[in-house]
Image: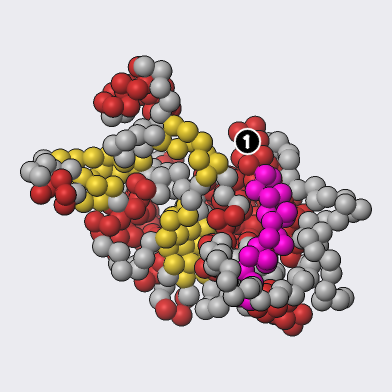
Amino acid sequence: MTDEIPAPESNLPPESSAAPRSLQELIDRVSGRRLTPSQPASGGSIVDTRPYPFLALVGQREMKLALLLSLINPAIGGVLLVGPRGTGKTTAVRSLSGLLPEVPHSLCVNGYGCMPEDVETGGVDSVCPDCARKYGHGEPLARLDQVRLFELPLNAEIEDVVGGVDAQAASANRLHIRRGLLAQADQHLLYIDEVNLLADPIIDAILDASAQRQYTVRRGPVAATYHARFVLIGSMNPEEGQLRPQILDRFGLRIIVNGLENRDDRLEAYRRVRSYQTNPRRTVEEYDPATDFARNEIQAARNLLPEVEIPDEVAHLGLALIDGMNIASLRAEITLFEAARAYAASDGRVKVTADDLRALAPMALRLRRSDFMRQYFEAQKLEENEIKGIINHVIPGETPPSQK
C-alpha cells in the first residue's frame, strides 16, 4: 500500500466508489486510509487552532464508536476511557468539536436554563419570571446552537463547579449566585481528564447533578436551581489510582484504550500526527469532507432516535446477558439498551437487533461486577441459610414465600 494518494478524495470515498452507507462504515473506511504528507505552513500564516480531526485517529474503533454514540443519545450515560498514557484518550475527546450536533439551547438571561418544555410540563411557574414573561408574549425561550465541549481542570474549586456568590454583585450589596461549570455545560459535553484524581466533593457534586439533571446552589438566604443535562466523559490512567465504585457505576460505556499493536498502524499514526504538527490547517481540511459527512449522519441519527424501538425478544436477550454476568446495577440495561438504540439509529434503522446487543455489550457491561459484593453476598447467604435452619427447628411450619 502506498503512503501517498490523492487528496481530498482520499478522506471521503472517491466519486467513482460507493459512498459510505452509515456512520459505522465511515469510521472503518477513513481509519484505513493513508494521509498525504503535508508541507510546512508558510511563516506568515495565522495559527489554526482547530483540534486534531476525530476521523484521523488511527484504530481505536471501540473508543471512537462509543464517543459518537454518546453524541447521538445522551441517555447512554456518558463514556469512561480507561488506559495508559499516550493512547489518544484526551485527543479523541477534544477532537469531537468538529462533529458536535446542534441542539436547542436556553435564551434565559438569568442563566437558569429555562426551556419551552419546562413550561409545557410544569407551567409558567417552572421558569424564571423573565422567561415566563417572554413565553407569555410569544417570544422564543430557546434557539438551535452547536453543542460545545467543556473541560474541568483538576485544580477547580467546588464553587467553580457548582457556582458561588457573584463578587461584583456582592460589592454592590446585592446577593447573586453566578453560574458554575455544571450549569454552563447544560446541553453540552463535560470532559474530566484524570477523573480518578478529582477531589471527592467535586466528583460527588458532578455525579449528583448528572443523575438528577439539575442541581440547587444555596448561599445564605439565596438559592438557585440550574439544569445540568450534560454528557459526562471521563478518562483515567489506572496506574494513577482507581475510581470509587459508586463513581464508576455512573458512567455508561466503559472503554479499555490500549496502545496500537500493529506496526503499520503505529507508523501511520505517527505520520498523521507529524502532518498535523507540520501544517494543522491542511490536515484538518483534508478530513473536512469526511467530518461533514459524519456530522450530518450524527444529526440524522439524533432525529431518528425517538422512533427506534427494542423488540421484547431482543430486550430479553439483553437482560439474559446482564443476568449471566451477575450484574446488580440497573444502569447496565439502561446503558446497553440506549446504546443499542443509538447504534441502530446510526445505521438508519428503527428496530434494535440481537447483533446490535452483541456489538455493544462489552462496552456497556465491562467493569460492572464487584468481587467485594460477590463475596459479601456469598457470606451473607450462609448466614441467611443458618437463620432459616434455626427458625425451622425452633418454630416448625411452612416457610413464607418471601423467605424462600
Q: Residue visible at 40% across and 49% down?
A: 185
Residue 283 appears at what percent x and percent y? 67, 67
Camera-side residue of 106 and 251: 106
Regarding residue 262, the answer to whether it shows in the image is no
Residue 261 appears at what percent x and percent y? 70, 80
The residue tagged 1 is 303
Taking the view exactly as shown, the residue that stands out farthest to the right is 16
Taking the view exactly as shown, the residue that stands out farthest to the left is 173
Q: In this view, does 176 lie above or below 114?
A: below
Q: Residue visible at 25% across and 51% down?
A: 163
What segment is highlighted magenta in the picture? Answer: 277-297
Regarding residue 98, the answer to whether it shows in the image is yes
Three-letter amino acid code at the position of disc 1: Asn
From the image, give the main secondary structure of the stretch colored magenta: helix
Q: Tag 1's secondary structure?
A: helix
Residue 157 appears at what percent x and percent y? 26, 62
